[in-house]
Amino acid sequence: MTRASLTRAARGALGTGGLAIIACDVVLTIRATGGLDVGDYLGQFTILSVVATSILMLLGASMARELRGAVYLRAMALTGLLVAAVLHATLLGGAAGPSGELVNTLLHVVFPVLALVEWVTVRSRTRVTLLTPLIGLAFPVVFLAATLARGAIVGRYPYDFVDPGAQGGYAGLVGSLAIVLVAFLAVGAFVAVIGAIRDRMLAPR
């Protein structure tokens, strides 16, 4: 098996595994709570990041040649996964959801680590640049804007740090969201540095 075939197989396995974890999470959550609000479920950044990464992996597995510029989507998805894992462990205390501890570990530890391994070992057609972490900010900015808009309509938010009521109003919310965006920028820069080192080490000689 060639390196390209092995890479596609590994990406296919990772993408399939990520969607399987989501499916288990949905089934076990419904079994434990008796129902599932789709809007609330998809409003979780971890879920969006896992789904986005899984889809990117499956697309990568299906193509003999990666699309130019895919590196930015890969970096954006990985940054989302890592930030979600860090925020879950710190701001949210690492508590498991209704689906249980095993699924919680798969979502917030195992899958992000495997995605990081994929990033470290597989180059993209386009090299990583200093713009990579800045472009990656598009994901959290859109997510936060959509979350605030939906929260204002339905009256509930997925996390306290995006809830104006929990932050003492919108003034407090600005500070909370600024910390989150700084975290994304820092993790995005970390991902970009690793990608740049990877590109240098794995470049054809």
Image: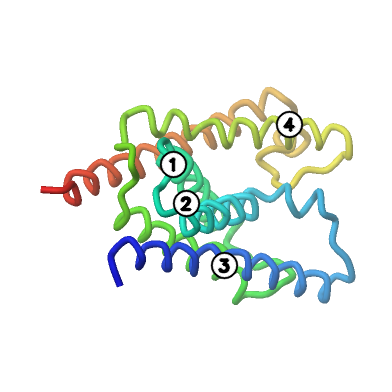
What residue appears at the point 41 percent right and 47 percent down from the top-left corner?
A: 66
Question: Reading the chain from its start, which is encountered first: label 4 or label 1?
Answer: 1
Q: Give the residue pinned by disc 1.
A: 67
Q: Residues within 10 Å of mark 1 (few under 14, many from 20)?
A: few
161 over 58 or under it: above or below: above
Q: Which residue is mark 3?
A: 16
Report crowding for label 4: few under 14, some 14 to 19, many 20 or more residues within 10 A (C-alpha): few
Circle 1 SS class: loop
N-terminal of the two: label 1 or label 3?
3
The span from disc 1 to disc 3 (Cα, nearest Å) is 20 Å
Q: Which mark is residue 82?
A: 2
Of labels 2 and 3, the one closer to you: 3
Q: Is residue 139 above or below residue 85?
A: above
Q: State which mark lies toward you, 1 or 2.
A: 1
Of residues 164 and 86, the one drawn nearer to the viewer in this rendering: 86
Q: Identify the residue at horizontal 49%, vertical 65% (top origin).
A: 12
The dot on residue 204 is: none
Q: Which residue is mark 4?
A: 168
Tag 3: residue type? Thr
